[in-house]
Image (cartoon, rainbow, N blue to C red):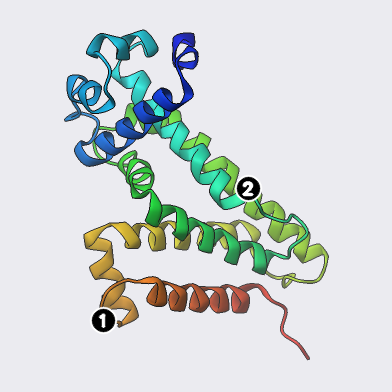
Amino acid sequence: MPKETLFKIAAEKREHLLREAALLFAERGFNQTDVAELAGRAGVAKGSIYNYFENKEDLYLYVCRDGMERSRRAVYGDMDPEWDVYRQVEHIFRQGARFVLAYPEYLILYDNISSAGMDRFSEQMSLEVEKFTADYLKRLIRRDMELGRVRNDVDVNWSAFFINSLYIIFMTSLVSGHFKIRMREYLEFEGEIDKESIEKQLRSMAVMIDRLLRPVKG
């Protein structure tokens, strides 16, 4: 956790520091990020960083949690809980893509948690990150199953896992060079990944999830 002094500085200064930290950690990774360079980019003295955080690890964890909260607000902030699972999932994917394209550094931080040598961070962050979405999706699917909107033979846990895994892979494919190539090969499309191509893939995924969950008529 950050020290109380972080919240005593001007909000604009605090935001600038956290944004620069997210960008630098995403660009260099935890081990290669230099606190002195971060201080320079943020426009503060190196010693000031340690007035706000115990150490670099404390700063990194806070930046990751801050990114997680920003992502959740962007994705779930204007969600109507009365929407059915199909509309909610489509909203999650659409808002998630918008957020990732605007702030790719936060997805990179999420992906980096699973990298080799990052176990000490994944042990603290992974459950914190994953439990929220897992519980949300499973609760949503169960609710709509009871309302007859979802087939009653669907495996709730696997369905939630599938939807979230598809989300992670697709979002990563928007920012990672390797995953962009992978997506092009599997989905067989050429050209730039632009708003039009993203929209097309979002519609395809919505149809696929609909077919997975929706009861068969007749």
Image height of 144 relative to 19, above or below: below
- In this view, the residue farthest toward the bottom is 218
Determine which quarter of the picture holds residue 174: bottom left
Residue 203, x across and y down, in percent: 52, 77
* Figure disc tally: 2
Residue 7 - label: none
In the image, taking residue 44 as reference, residue 162 lies left or right, namely: right
Density class for disc 1 (Cα within 10 Å; few <14, some 14-19, many ≥20) is few
Q: Marks 1/2: CA distance?
A: 34 Å
Q: Are marks 1 and 2 in contact (CB under 8 Å)?
A: no
Marker disc for residue 190:
1
Report the side of 63 relative to 191 (left or right): right
Residue at point 23%, 13% (across, down): 46
Residue appearing at x 20%, y 23% in the figure: 40
At label 1, the amino acid type is Glu
Decide which of tag 1 and tag 2 comes sooner along the chain: 2
Q: Is residue 181 left or right of residue 212?
A: left
Q: Amino acid at mark 2?
A: Gly
Q: Residue at x 43, y 27 (%)?
A: 12
Judging depth in this view, the residue of 188 and 91 nearest the camera is 91
Residue in front for this viewpoint, 42 or 62:
42
Q: Which mark is residue 77?
A: 2
Categorize mark 2 by other alpha carbons within 10 Å: few (<14), some (14-19), many (20+): few
Q: Nearer the viewer, residue 21 or 84?
A: 21
* Residue 170 in picture, x, y percent from top left: 40, 63
Which image quadrant for residue 141?
A: bottom right
* Quarter of the figure with residue 176: bottom left
| Left or right position of 69 against 195 | right
Mark 2 secondary-structure assignment: loop
Where is residue 200 shown, x and y percent of the image?
45, 79
